[in-house]
Amino acid sequence: MPATLTRSHPAPLLPSVTFSVSDLSNGERAVALYASDMPLRFMMQPGTETTVAAWILQGAARLGLAELHRSAAYAYGYRLLWLANWTTPEQDQAHKQRFPDARRWDRAERLASTFTVWGKHSMMQAAKERGLRPLVEGACRCGGTGWIDTCFDPDDPTTAVSMNCPGHNPGGCMPRPVVIA
Ligand SMILES: [Zn+2]
């Protein structure tokens, strides 16, 4: 008899909600999983999509959509700043307060990505667009201007540049002064 490859995980009771998993971005799915009863060691396998979807709805119902959207946007903004190695202590602290269990957050992000990539549940266009809009929590190096002054070579002032803040200005567009005719 072959070894049993899957463990059964009890799916949570589906909460009564007015939205579906398709209404949530990948980041929002991760935040919802973090807030759900998802066991830390759960591994997604074929046939477990419904269970994961139920956890996503469970976590989303616990947080409420407004908080879910906000938390996911903050997490995305923090990820962008972290990748650029530009987080501030205030941003690090805000992220830790929002997701105090780093291992659980890592698991939730990985599971959400696997769930989304498997593609059994579509994603509405509004959720896709919302998932690309970061928010920043905590004092930012750019001071909210969207631009960070840096210098590639401290000994060469000609290498000083303004770079776009990935959290406040992910598109990197140089703002133009408003001209009133
Ligand atoms: Zn910024």
Image (cartoon, grey):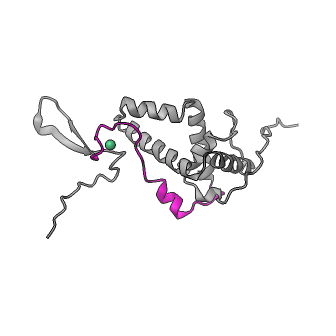
Give x and y (percent) for residue 138.
39, 37
Q: Quadrant of the C terminus?
A: bottom left
Q: Is residue 8 left or right of residue 101?
A: right
Q: Quadrant of the N terminus?
A: top right
User: For the point 16% across and 39% down, which residue is it?
Assistant: 160
Give x and y (percent) for residue 132.
44, 54
Between 106 and 62, the one lying in front of the other is 62
User: For the point 71% across and 44% down, which residue is it?
Assistant: 45
Q: Residue furthest right?
A: 1
Q: Residue furthest bottom?
A: 181
Give x and y (percent) for residue 111.
62, 43
Label the magenta part by its dominant secondary structure: loop
Q: Give the image quarter of residue 78.
A: top left
Magenta-colored span: 119-146
Q: Is residue 16 left or right of residue 174?
A: right
Give x and y (percent) for residue 116.
60, 52
User: For the point 65% across and 45% down, which residue is it?
Assistant: 62
Q: Is residue 129 magenta?
A: yes
Q: How many marks?
A: 0
Quadrant of the displayed image that contains ligand 1: top left
Q: Is residue 26 magenta?
A: no
Q: Is residue 14 left or right of residue 165?
A: right
- In the image, is residue 39 above or below residue 53? above
Q: Is residue 141 left or right of residue 52?
A: left
User: For the point 57% across and 30% down, which residue is it?
Assistant: 101
